[in-house]
Amino acid sequence: MATYQKRKKGITATVRIKPHPSQSQTFTTMRDAKSWAHELELKLKNEKKGDYNHILFKEILEEYRDNVSVLKKGADRERSRINQLIRIMDVETPLINIDFDYLVRYRESRLEEVSSMTVRREMQVLSAVLTWCVDTKLYLKESPMQKVRLPKISDHRERVITDCEVEILLPFLNNELKSIFLLALETGMRQSEICELEWERVQIDKKYLFLKTTKNGRSREVPLSKNALEILSKLNARKSGRVFKYEAKYASYDFMKARIEAELFDIVFHDTRHTAATRIALKLPLLDLCKMFGWSDPKRAMIYYNPTATEIASRL
């Protein structure tokens, strides 16, 4: 049962239903206090009986986003993906309605709009959320994603940016974005790694920079070529702080606008990593290349090393 206390600032309603801890909230009117208490009592009593009809899928996604995703290394990316799911899915439905048929219908309709890899990533997030509902929240006995087949992994992109395309694109980039782009071509660093780089980790005299955290969770040292050193030296290095003012998401957006203005519709920023790997592979032994790019499996080199048949023929 709920209890109510009059206070200077209004009415405090308190709900006590075991095994849940007591919950209190203050309202300006008794009507609002009773409405809140009644709704909470119903929710807690249903949970006590194992009846979760009242819990909407939207509430689950929001709770996972705000309490679980934020603790992950790729928090921003996952939170953005969950926000997208909330916008495009029918989430105003009880969690118990999220079944095999619901998920398959979503997968098939989504495949008509975006790539299989995008749908695969979205389904992986949904799988994590539903598994959390089973293992942590105890809302479900099993995840409906268990029998849902994920879309196949699409073929790896093998796009290398040519010298001519670099020259065409550069005039459309502002000075800082130009430096980020050229540094990526010289080092193969990811856009986020460059944007988060700090001067404390740049060792100009020793010709390398240190990345504390990377996509795979491990740190790595990145050797700097003569051109890379020149790019960094022209930035008027400060003693501390970030090398670039750009945040990765804004750099990505501005790069996209620039390539469209330059009518280079077929390239993306991540192609700089393929381009750098293809160029540097001609200069370094395989193990050194893997060390520089942070690959624990040498097979990764075959994904990013993308020479043309003509280029290979020229070296025969």
Image (cartoon, rainbow, N blue to C red):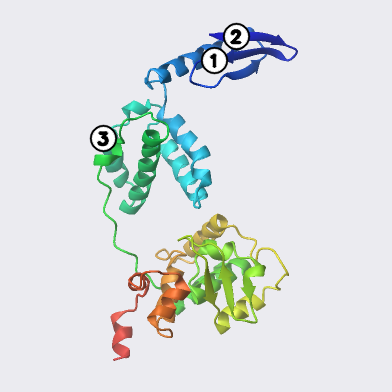
Rendered location of residue 264, percent (x, y): 44, 66
- Residues 170 and 224: in front is 224
The mark nearer the N terminus, 2 or 1, is: 2
The mark nearer the N terminus, 1 or 3, is: 1
Question: In the figure, 48 relative to 157: above or below?
Answer: above
Tell me where residue 55 sits by quadrant: top left
- Mark-to-mark CA distance, 1 and 3: 36 Å
Rendered location of residue 3, percent (x, y): 60, 9
- Do the residues bearing badges 2 and 1 touch, measured as CB atoms within 8 Å? yes
Q: Nearer the viewer, mark 3 or mark 2?
A: 2
Q: Count residues near mark 3 (Cα–Cα under 10 Å), then give few for <14, some for 14-19, many for 20+.
A: some
Q: Which residue corresponds to mark 1?
A: 16
Q: Secondary structure at mark 1?
A: loop
Q: Count residues near mark 1 (Cα–Cα under 10 Å), then give few for <14, some for 14-19, many for 20+.
A: some
- Residues 127 and 157: in front is 127
- Do the residues bearing badges 3 and 2 touch, measured as CB atoms within 8 Å? no
Question: In the figure, 56 relative to 171: above or below?
Answer: above
